Structures are given as C-alpha cells and as structure tokens.
Amino acid sequence: MTPKKVLCIEDEQFISEMYARALTKAGYEVSVEFDGASGLKAAQTNQFDIILLDLMIPTMTGIEVLRHLRDTSETPNLKSKIIITTNLEQREDVRADIERQADGYVVKAELTPRELVAFLEKLN
Amino acid sequence: MNDLDKLAVQTRWFLALLVGFENLALVSWLYIAWQLDLSGYILWPGIAAIVLIGGLFVALIGGHQVLKPIRTVWQAVLHISPTDHGVVAPDLQKLHYGRELLVNLIGQIYQLNNIASSQASADQLEKTDLKNDFVATNMPLPLVVLDANEIIVFINSAATKYLQKSAEELIGNSIYSVLDMSFPNEHTFDLWLNDVKMNNVTAQNSWERVRFGLADQHSLQFDLSAYYNKDNSRGYETMLVLFDHTEQYSQDDQAVSFIALAVHELRTPLTLLRGYIETFQDEFSGKLDDELSTFMHRMAASGEQLAAFVNNILNVARVEDDQLTLELHEESVKDVISGAVDNYILRAKVRGIDLECNIAEDLPTAALDRVSAYEIVGNLIDNAIKYAGNSNKIIVSAVQNNEHLIEISVQDSGVGIPTNVVPNLFTKFYRNHRNRAQIGGTGLGLYLCKALVTAHSGHIWVRSEEGKGSVFSFTVLPYSQLADELKSGNNKDITRSAHGWIKNHSMYRS
C-alpha cells in the first residue's frame, strides 16, 4: 500500500518538525511548507491525501489558502482532506464557518502528536 | 359600468316617471273637466275657465313642490356620478319641506360615495402584483416576502442575485428550507416570528451578523430587518430586507482580540512542551529510574494543567462576552465522568492522590455538553487536588437524587473552607485569603463551573468543614426531561440553530 501523503502548512518550525516526525513514524509521507503562498502552490501542484493547514501563517492566511483550495474554478480536482490545525481562538460562529469549509479542525495545544495521528487515522 | 353609474341611470328613469306623473295630473284635470262637460253650461264658462286655469296652476306648482326633494336627491346622485360631469351640488338651503330629512339622506349618499371610492382605490392596489411593482422589483436591496405559512411568495432580483439562487428555487418554498440562516444568539428570526404571530398585529425587528452559507461553502453575512403585518389581504404577511456586510464582518472576524492573541502565544509553546513530553515518555519509558520517571510525570501533569488553565481563561472570556453556547446531547454520565477523571489521574498521582469513581449503576442518560461537563468535573477535581492538604483520596460520585436530577459530587478530605467564605466561592477572582499565600490559583475555576452548570439548568453548591474537607456537588437534567421540554417547545432557552437544537446560556452572569 502506498503511504498516504500529507502536506503540513505551518510556520512554526518546531511544530512542523514534531508533526512530521510523528506522522512519518506512523507511515505517512510528509511535506512541509512554511507560508500560505507556497503551501497553496504545493497543494495545487501535487495531490495530497491530507493537508494540515495552520491559520496564522505568513504571505497568505490559512483562511485565504482554504478559500483558494475550495474554489473549484481554481483547484478543480482537489481530493485532499483539509484539516485546520491552529492555536488561534475564534468566535464560535467564525469557527463554525471555517469548519464547514474544512474536513476537520483541531487546536494544536489540545492534541499531542500521537492524538493527531489517531485523529487522521479516523478520517476515512 | 359601476354601481354608481347604475344608480344615476335608475335615478334618471325615476325622475322621468315623476315628470310624467306631473303632466298626468294636468291631463287628468282636463279630462275631468271634459267628462263633466263644464263647457256645456253657458252660465258657467267663466267659472269653468277659472277652475281650469286654477287647476292647471295647482297641478304645476304643487307637482313641482312635491317633487322638489326627489329632484334634489337626484341632483346629488348625478353630482357624484363619475360619468355625469358638470352637474352642480344641490343647494339644500332652497328646500322648504322636509329639509332635515333630506340633508340627512343626501349626507348618507355622499358618505356611501366616499366608502365606494376608497374601496375602489383599494381594489386598484389589490390588483397590483409585486412582480409588476417597479420599486419592489428593482430596489437595490434584497427583499423577500412571506405569506402566513412562511412560504416565499416574492423575491426581488437583488435577493436572487445575492443569495445565488433562482426565483424558481425560492418561491413557493418555506423560508426555513431554502434560507437556513444562523444567528449569533438565541434571538432568532423564527422565534420572533412565532411570537409576533401570537401577540401582534404589526411588528418590526432587526438582527445583526446573520449568516447564510452559500452552495460553494462561502458564507454571506448580513443584517436583517423584518416587518410583520397580520392577515395582509394580499398574503404579504412578512417582509424581509437584507443588508449585506459580508466583507466588513469577515474583517471583524479576522481581527484578533487581546485574549485570543495571548492564548495563541501561550498555546504555541504548550503544543511543543506537550508534544515533546509525549515523545520522551514514549521513548524513555522503562529506561528511566524512579526519580526521573516521577519528574517526567510531573512535567506531563503540568503541561495538562496549563492547557486546562488556558481553556478556563477562554471560557471565562466567552461567558463575559455572551459567546459561549452549549449543545446538549444525550450522554452516559459514566462515560463523561470517566473521561474527565482520566485527564486528572496523572495530576493526582504526581501529588500522591488516588482518584476514585463511584457512579450508580442505574443512572439514566443525562443532557450534557460533553466538553463543558469535562470542564466542570475537571475544575472541581483540580480544586480538590490543590486543597487536598495531607489527604490522599478524592471521590467522584454520581447518583439520581430524590428530585430525579442527576447529582455529581467531588469529595475531598482536605483543608476545607471556612463557613464565612462559602457564599463568595462562586464569584470571579474570589479566593480564600488565608490560602492565597500557600496555594496558587486564579479564582476563575468555580466561577466558570457555576456558569456552565447554570447553563445546563442545574445548581452547584458546597458542603464543607474546616480541617475535614469539602464536597462540591452539582445537578444536571436527565436526558428524558430535556427531551420532554424540547417536545413541548415551551422552553425559550432552547433554540434552533443550523446545527440542530442548542441551548444558549449567554445570559448567565452570576
């Protein structure tokens, strides 16, 4: 079975390294991008199974990246599951709005790497 | 030909009849004179002539006077007739006989005319279809009109464009099925409409920050104004106007409050600490001596404590800001308590305390918001750990009390609480002065517990004795009781949202 491909768009280097390590150990193939624009480009050029998307990232916010990825005229064949990974606290209605557009929403501080892996396993 | 025209024609016929009757009186006199053959009497020709002329005179004058009131009425009718122009209003001063009666009668004619013409102009409006109404159709604001059954009967072009749906998709459907709006709090449009339908003839209301999710998953954000008008004859009972603020409100949404920013900065290092502690635990387990292993556990416990505290800060901010909403679901009390207790086993263990669960077997399911329930039980356990003193056991129990409510308690055998501070315990930032120097804490925990318990329609209290320990207890509803309330629909606190039934508890400020 080919390993599932994960794109981690995360500007905090230690967090992306930590996630990459845990996910690689669990059998995923992980790519990392540090800002919104390059993350979006990577997501549009390669087919990932899962995209972990931080919201507060440079050049383009996670919400903008999400919007571009969900725009079918721009990214018509996106099959990736998009999981918002953030430590930002949002108003409930705002969070609900983002959740509607994504396939999952996690608060990084509330999840250890092991729990994140367990969460991704349950996606399909 | 309308009713008034018919009346005018009939009046004219009647008048012709009366004039005929006048002439008939004259002809009758001539006939009588001829029958009596008065002219045959030579001696009486002068008398006959006088009687003849006198009779003629009486017939003419009398007839005219007798018919005058009827002529006046006729003149009044012709005056108001829409087709007879140029007939002046009758001069009522010229009447000699029955003036009072006639003034009254003509007054009524004019009054009838007023009613008829206002009815006619209403009929005119009645025939106006909103689709053909220039203002309604072309108004540059989205307009939606509902009938008495909340079915969309009209939608203007600005609205179809804004909502990205065709008129055919919308008209004839219930507003709730095609336009499922989310409101920022429990004062929703449908609750308002139900209320005004029962209590008002006309009413008006506005809402801010209403959301509607488009098919492409974007959300529109707008302010909404509604006008209600009971039993409108055209079936236009409720009118909705939408004021778009999508751009402005999404900018507001992205503006980050101080608390959100502070929490974000706390959480980033916390994520790393918890993550790497887990890595160390995984990879060093069994390789560390007892002392280092204890330190490892303390690190992990501290990380969890910090994470819980960050959540407390956020939740208190939400309570203060009317932003906290609960979703009550059917939950097993045992599962929820076990889950909460599991989070604290490590923290209790590093302080040498055993956590014991004591849950009645036959408990019914409860109406709980799982995350909030974790927070209530967690904060009570956290307090029990902090104030455990030299004791080494905390008991978490759940029973159904004699009011059939589910009562959950956290019992410690620690330092206890002096009687005089008990009343203030659930106040924000309140802490027992004597303990302040020895035990850390913010005084947010119990304040939050009270807000969360109240939002579950429960109560929270404490029994405590100094030196012997405390029992904090709170109640929640059995699920069956909430289900009954949902069915009867009388509980105003339970509101419909895009996500099903929610219970909004933003109104609680204890």
Image: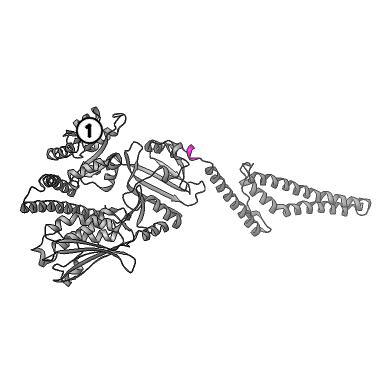
Between B207 and B150, which is closer to the camera in this rendering?
B150
Is residue A72 rendered to the left or right of residue B463? right
What chain letter is assigned to the residue under label 1?
Answer: A
Q: How is the image coloured?
A: one colour
Point out residue B353 in the picture as x, y percentages from the top left corner: 14, 61
Q: What kind of element bears circle 1? A: loop
- Badge 1: how crowded within 10 Å, few (<14), some, or many (20+)? few
* Percent position of residue B461, x then y: 24, 67
Residue situated in front as seen by the camera: B425 or B201: B425
Res B6 → quadrant:
top right
Which quadrant is home to the C terminus of chain B?
bottom left
Q: Most extreme residue toward the top, as rendered?
A: A45
Q: Position of residue B255 (x, y in %)?
A: 21, 43
**Amino acid bearing label 1:** Pro
Is residue B247 left or right of B348 when viewed as pictured?
A: right
* Total numbered circles: 1
Q: Is residue B255 magenta?
A: no
Vertically, is B394 above or below B156? below
Residue B217 visible in image: yes
**Residue B83 locus on image (x, y percent):** 63, 41
Mark 1 sits on what residue? A3
The residue stretch that appears in magenta: B127-135
Q: Is B133 a magenta residue?
A: yes
- The relative height of residue B157 versus residue B341 in the rendered view (above or below) is above
Quadrant position of residue B97: bottom right
* Name of the residue lying farthest toward the front: B286
Residue A87 in sight: no
Looking at the image, residue B469 lies above or below residue B121: below
Q: Quadrant of residue B181?
A: top left
Split into 4 quadrants, where in the image is the N terminus of chain B? top right
